[in-house]
Image: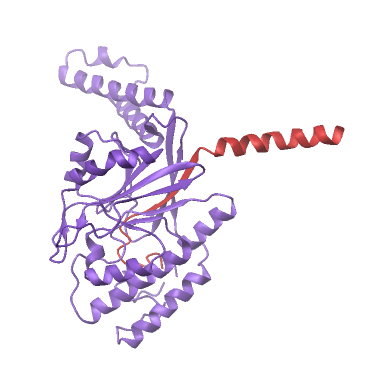
Amino acid sequence: MGGLARKATVIKNLKAEGINPLILDAGDLLFKKNILDPGVTLDVSKVNAEIIIDSFNEMGCDAFSVGSKDFAGGLDFILEQYKKSNFPFLSANIVNRSGQLIFEPYTILKSNNINIGVIGLTSVFDNNEIQILDPIASLRNILEEVNSKSDVVILLFNASQQDLTKLYNDDLELDMILSSRGRTRSSDGGAQIPTYIAGDRGKILYKFELNLVDKAVPFTDLAWCENTINRVEDRLEKMKQGNPDADLIKLYRNDQKTLNRIYGYQSQLNQANQSLENAVNTLSFEKIELGKLIFDSPNILKIVDKGKEKILEIGGPMLDIQGRLPGDPHHGHNH
Amino acid sequence: MIKLIYILIVLCPLLSIESNNSNILTIIGTTNVHGEIDPCG
């Protein structure tokens, strides 16, 4: 087994080290697609989703922001999971047909005497049972209230790239964004509000460390600074055409286009170096691969086994020899 | 008295680490799990 059972072990080990992490999920947790074919496929997927909720209940979760794919089992199904979960489902812009919010828009968590506001949000998607309000307007409506109660504000956003761009242009007071929908694995949080996507299928956990010194100052994303410095230095070095002592301005004095590129790189380099030097609050992260060296949590294995029995009862497709459920990309593989 | 000084010397760095850690927030984040319970095999 892997995935959930290993995630639980990582969390347990951190707790044993005296670290009490906040566990957050940015959405598209329960299903693969926005719409699933009715019948056995949907029934099996629902059992999978129940296994995930039961496992999250067991290992602990502090907030889950509901995304578009989480509605693939229907509104009643997700409300049922919400009721039986011991952690908050969040969304500041998913409303029912009467226009009322279905979930709490945000929650305030406390860790190491730091108040953390966590907001749930999603970009617009089609679903007949619910409505999705404009995400940026909905965020703006609650952000002042959340900021007044929090030292750090984190947005869990099932976001389209277009909405992320809009959000950056709005200059909103957010410390960090954990974004789903994209499938990339971020190597840094970018030049704007630190924004991270932790890949897909739960293969990798991102462990962030936020060091808060002054609540009034934004966080400096150390990975972005370091990556920018390395990337730009590398490019400038290549432009020296094998002569490490070359003066780039002299070398390209007759090539205004290249000179402009060099000035651009130097400006990026200065910005990243200054951010590092002046950093007050810092954000760093590490990727934790849930590989075979991490033991499976026996409690989660029990939950999964119970789910598999249920799948057999409903007449779902048989599990493979490795005990993998249908839909698993490794289903049927002998490894 | 010497024992007390020894204990203080040993504890001081530990207490200082504890105090520095009080501003650190650790977050475990996941995205796009997509209903996968065993993606790693």
Q: How did the renderer colour the structure?
A: by chain
Task: Identify the residue shown where x is 37% and y is 16%.
Answer: A245
Count all numbered tags in the image, as a single digit: 0
Q: Which residue is pictured at 24% across the width and 54% down the height?
A: A181
- Nearer to the camera, A257 or A217: A217
Tell me where residue A167 appears, x and y as whole percent.
Answer: 21, 39
- Give the quadrant of residue A145: top left
Q: In this picture, is A187 found above or below A86? A: above
Who's the residue at 51% across and 71% down the image? Answer: A299
Query: In the image, which lettered chain appears purple?
Result: A
Viewer-side residue, A232 vs A88: A88
> What color is chain B drawn in?
red
Q: Which of A154/A272 is in front?
A: A154
Is there any visible trace of residue A14 in the rendered image?
yes
| Quadrant of res A35 | bottom left
Residue A293 seen anywhere in this rendered image of the structure: no
Instruction: Please identify the quadrant where the N terminus of chain A is shown.
Output: bottom left
Quadrant of the snapshot with the C terminus of chain A = bottom left
Can you say whether A10 is above or below A251 in the image? below
Q: Is residue A315 above or below residue B15?
A: below
Residue A139: x, y in percent? 24, 44
In this rendered view, identify the residue nearer to me: A93 or A175. Answer: A93
Residue A244: x percent and y percent?
Answer: 37, 20
Q: Is residue A317 left or right of residue B29?
A: left
Instruction: Give coordinates of residue A79: x percent, y percent.
Output: 28, 68
